[in-house]
Amino acid sequence: MSGDRSAPPVTVSAGSPRSAVTNGLDLAALLTDRATKVVVTCGSGGVGKTTTAAALALWAADAGRKVAVLTIDPARRLAQSLGLDELDNDPRRVELPADTDTDTSGELWAMMLDSRRTFDEMVAAHSTPERAEQIYGNPFYQSISTSFSGTQEYMAMEKLGKLAGTGQYDLIVVDTPPSRSALDFLDAPQRMSAFLDGRMIRLLASPGRGVLKVVGAGLTLFTRAVTAVIGGQMLADAAKFVQLFEDMFGGFRTRAEATYQLLRRPGTSFVIVAIPEPDALREAAYFTDRLQAERMPLAGLVLNRTHPPATDLTVAATEQLQQRLATGPDGDPQDELLAGLLSVHAERATTRDAELRMRRRFQRQHPGLPVREVPALPSDAHDLEALRTVGAALAGPVPVGPTPA
Amino acid sequence: MGHDAPMPAVAPSSADSGLPVATLTRPGWTAAHRRARLHVVSGKGGTGKTTVAAAMALALAVDGRRVLLIEVEERQAIARLFDVPPLPYEERKIAIATGGGEVRALAVDVEAALLEYFEMFYNLGFAARSLRRMGAIEFATTLAPGLRDVLLTGKAKETVTRTGHDNRPVYDAVVMDAPPTGRIVDFLDVTVAMASLARRGPIHGQADGVIRLLHSPDTMVHLVSLLEDMPVAETLEAIEHLRAADLPVGSIIVNAATGSRLPEPAAAAAGRLDADTVRDRIRALGADVGPATVTGLLQEGRDHAVRVLDEADCRRRLEGAALPMLQLPRLADGADLGGVYELAELLAEQGVHA
């Protein structure tokens, strides 16, 4: 018999389980507030941004709002569950299985961003059909509309502006591209328009005009060097593109500026998503600082995939029990099971300690920023039901009955 | 550097229990892997490829060998991992491996690499700096998207083939923390990248050498994956594309795997554990626990078991790729420098050594 009956009793209590979960960020209030028109989820790659965006959108639709969710690169199975098998670059209505508690007056529309198509549409809107055709066929255009770093970010913002402009939705939830840095999408429109304004293209394509005296002879050399590297044809295509594009710059700039202003309006809220790991929290910290510096409307941080304990068994008690088990004879299946359960709990407690440490550090740097923890699901969310579970973890139960007008 | 990770990297296979534990059905690295000199490490964002690349460099640097760890994404992830100031564009010693070997790190800066070329072939001098300030280099690399990749792979090739006074290679191995799986084939398929470049000229000449190296047995591409749906899907897709492009795939490295801690995960996942039995057993050990405490304990066991079963599924899908599969545990304390040494030791146990 393992375990000494005469051993002193083990003290087990540690207060109520999950007590460490604080719900400072009230997403239910944010999503049901009629004044909230746009919610942007952002954060570094792999933290569950897309799932969070989809779950928030579904929650708001269940609460009776007409919601569009703009996803960037959803997991295949998540995309399927949202009916996004086909890329048509416009929102499609998602059939919502009726849940007894939900308000059926809500609607969920979902789309997956096609950057190239969004770019084409933008060109079409600012040019004549003939000129648009010429632009589509230009190799340089093909290159920037697909591979310029920042195109996707820019196009996500462009699409958001367009969806918001239709006035068809009560709420638009936008996922942001999986950038190298979470900050990329804020800077993308500006970088893109600086790039497209053509100064360098002109300089390189026709150095004879001597645009910049500072560089002088070095420029000619540089042009030669660049031509040697990337070839004259590419420069010629670029020059041709600038010509075709010239009239459009004004329109592009205005739109980029308008979208940026849309992001700063009171109806917009940013939700930063992170997981309790140093890199993700570092990105979240940069992002928080940046949004605050630019006076962007920041709702708070979703700390995703945390591991709050489900039981109040303390670490000390767990260790004591493990020791008492270990002194007993091997081979009892019940003891093996208990040993396993205790080791699962001990590991979870260690993980939890690390999480709380990281969270405290983040909150010391950003006092006052509301935080909402979302415990890790044992499996990925692939269907609407799982998304509803995530939504409930994010924003609590969906309010019953129609939301007040 | 000792490790006391509770889950062994290569779990002893307890045949009779039929556990979907971290049992490796595939061998680790072979002699062919150890002969390769350029190890390209890719993986979906968030899988820990930088940490794994660093651990691999440490594992390969045993017994007085010298290994270079190259970063190509300009995000200073290596400096952060090793807790040193941002790395300049030069090779710096950042770690000492077991037995006195050393790991140097290089954060490749595309602009600097391009200017290095221009300096070699055209004497730009002062003008180069002002052009850099004006964003001309970024412009050139944007204009020809392949240029960036050619410069980065070109730099890697230079370090692999560089020899010292004794005509021996300066580095015994070079480990590259490469772009994520979504970009890895474009990145390594220099032939395609060259289509956006001039047909002659210095870069073109070098690209030919890069192509030869990348398609030779001297190079191995390793993919880091988590046992989750999306990373697995991306890993399998990347393997298919790498093979189609005739690039040598070396191994899959499963990171942050959950080893099973329960004797019968299937029963635990299905919620078939009996709370009363567990509670009685705990009380017999001298702890007076209430039903809620036990229910919570079982809930945690159930979450764990569901995770373990999902991971077993993912592992089976990865096994379809018929590649050596290495496995690393989740570091409960997060990936810090100590963790990198721990992972290096676990990689060494699976064949990653000199």
Image: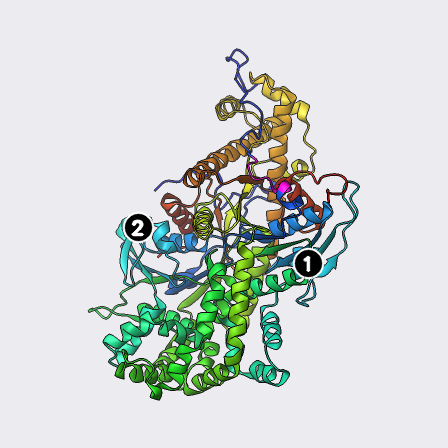
For numbered disc 2, what is the local secondary structure? Answer: loop
How busy is the neighbourhood of tag 2: few (under 14 within 10 Å), some, or many (20 plus)? few
Q: How far from the left and from the top, in percent, is residue B34?
A: 39, 61
Q: Please say if A192 is above or below B17.
A: below
Q: Gap in Å between the C-alphas at discs 2 and 1?
A: 44 Å
Q: Quadrant of the N terminus of chain B?
A: top left
Q: Quadrant of the C terminus of chain B?
A: bottom left
Q: Label 2 is placed on what type of residue?
A: Val
Give the colour scheme of this rendering.
rainbow
Q: How far from the left and from the top, in percent, is residue B258?
A: 54, 43
Q: Which residue is mark 2?
A: B84
Q: Residue at x 59, y 60 (%)?
A: A73
Q: Name the residue furthest bottom.
A: A208
Q: Chain of mark 2?
A: B
* Quarter where residue A162 is shown: bottom right
Q: Chain of mark 1?
A: A
Residue B105 shown left or right of residue B240 in the figure: left
For numbered disc 1, what is the local secondary structure? Answer: strand
Residue B206 shown left or right of residue A48 in the figure: left
B179, A104: nearer the viewer: A104
On whether disc 2 and disc 1 are found on a single subunit, the reply is no
Asked whether residue B144 is in view, the answer is no
Q: Label 1 is placed on what type of residue?
A: Ala
Residue range highlighted in magenta: A23-29
Q: Residue at x 64, y 59 (%)?
A: A76
Q: How far from the left and from the top, in percent, is residue B318?
A: 58, 57
Q: Which residue is mark 1?
A: A110
Q: In the image, is residue B169 part of the stretch drawn in magenta?
A: no
